[in-house]
Image: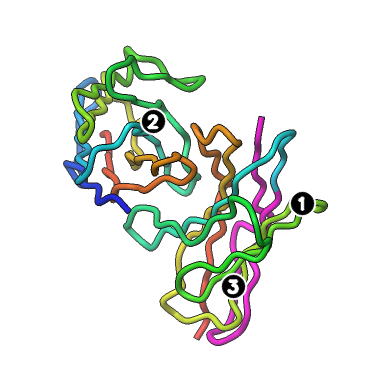
């Protein structure tokens, strides 16, 4: 069975500074990996996904993530954050069957002025 | 991506009553999912609802408490039965993409049980 660990429950960062949100997964089979964002009082929106191919994945709003199979990680990064990036970020994993997605506990990104 | 709407967007209900949440999609989809997000928590899958078959429930969730209907390829309902304050959560529906590898989410229904 798959599982996802988001190592930080909250990450404060100054506006225009870089940020990295950490995610590690556990699985005995090939996986697909996702990052979702949940803005205050809204549903979830897909930021980016890794299915296969290049290990560096670019998503919306300037975010990118790198799949590292040896370290079983899929960390999310942005070189310069904005106040509008304030949200909850969820890392998620699905196995090759794709019939179920397992979500991490989420990381709250708090942008400091 | 699909456009998903949910009704109601929020509700306050008394314990012991039931609430039915509707999920409407703007295109035909095979796989629909229902999640619960308790305050300050991540998403927990309640069940998978495929058209033409019984819903498949995850461990800890039962049909008597969370009956689901899936009458066609664009619509589903989730009922939260005999509610208690512990059922206060956001309930989200989602749909699978063509290969179901990623999911698209509705805006959620915020339920408060008093």
Name the chain letter of the residue that bears numbered label 2: B
Label 1, on which residue? Answer: A69
Labels 3 and 2 within one chain: no
**On the rendered structure, is B110 left or right of A3?**
left
Callouts 2 and 1 in the same chain: no
Question: Of helix, strand and loop, which one carries label 1?
Answer: loop
Of badges 1 and 3, the one in the foreground is 1
Q: Quadrant of residue B47?
A: top left
Q: Position of residue A109 (x, y in %)?
A: 53, 67
Q: Callout 3 environment at 10 Å: few (<14), some (14 to 19), or many (20+)? A: few
First-in-chain label (1 vs 3): 3
Magenta stretch in the rendered image? A1-24
Please report, as a chain letter, where disc 1 is located. Answer: A
**In the rendered image of this protein, does residue A78 appear above or below residue A39?**
below
Q: Confirm whether the magenta stretch covers residue A16.
A: yes
Front disc: 3 or 2: 3
Q: Chain of mark 3?
A: A
Q: Spatial distance from mark 1 to mark 3, Cα to Cα?
A: 28 Å
Determine whether the residue tagged by mark 2 lies in a helix, strand or loop.
helix
- Position of residue A63 in the picture relative to residue B89 (left or right): right
Q: Which residue is mark 2?
A: B86
**Of labels 2 and 1, the one closer to you:** 1
**Which residue lies most toward the front here?**
A53
Q: What's the distance in space between the residues labelled 3 and 2, CA to CA?
A: 31 Å
- Residue A97, percent across and down? 55, 32
Q: Position of residue B51 (x, y in %)?
A: 28, 23
Residue placed under numbered mark 3 in the picture: A12
Which of the 4 image quarters holds residue B11?
A: top left
Q: Residues within 10 Å of mark 1 (few under 14, many from 20)?
A: few
Q: Residues within 10 Å of mark 2 (few under 14, many from 20)?
A: few
Can you tell which quarter of the image residue B39 is in? top left
């Amino acid at each position: 069975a798959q599982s996802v660990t988001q190592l930080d429950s909250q990450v404060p960062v100054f506006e225009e500074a870089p940020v990295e949100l950490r995610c590690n997964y556990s699985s005995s089979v090939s996986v697909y990996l996702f990052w979702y964002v949940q803005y205050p009082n809204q549903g979830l929106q897909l930021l980016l996904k890794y299915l296969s191919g290049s290990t560096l994945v670019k998503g919306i709003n300037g975010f990118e993530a790198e799949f590292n199979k040896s370290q079983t990680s899929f960390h999310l990064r942005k070189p310069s954050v904005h106040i509008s990036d304030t949200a909850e970020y969820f890392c998620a994993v699905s196995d090759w069957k794709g019939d179920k997605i397992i979500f991490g506990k989420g990381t709250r990104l708090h942008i400091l002025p | 991506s699909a456009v998903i709407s949910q009704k109601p967007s929020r509700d306050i209900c008394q314990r012991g009553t039931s609430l039915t949440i509707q999920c409407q999609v703007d295109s035909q989809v095979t796989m629909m999912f229902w999640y619960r997000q308790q305050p300050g928590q991540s998403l927990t899958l309640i069940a998978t609802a495929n058209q033409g078959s019984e819903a498949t429930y995850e461990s800890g969730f039962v049909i008597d408490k969370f009956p689901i209907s899936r009458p066609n390829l664009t619509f589903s309902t989730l009922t939260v039965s005999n509610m208690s304050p512990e059922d206060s959560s956001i309930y989200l529906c989602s749909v699978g993409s063509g290969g179901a590898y990623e999911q698209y989410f509705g805006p959620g229904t915020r339920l408060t049980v008093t």
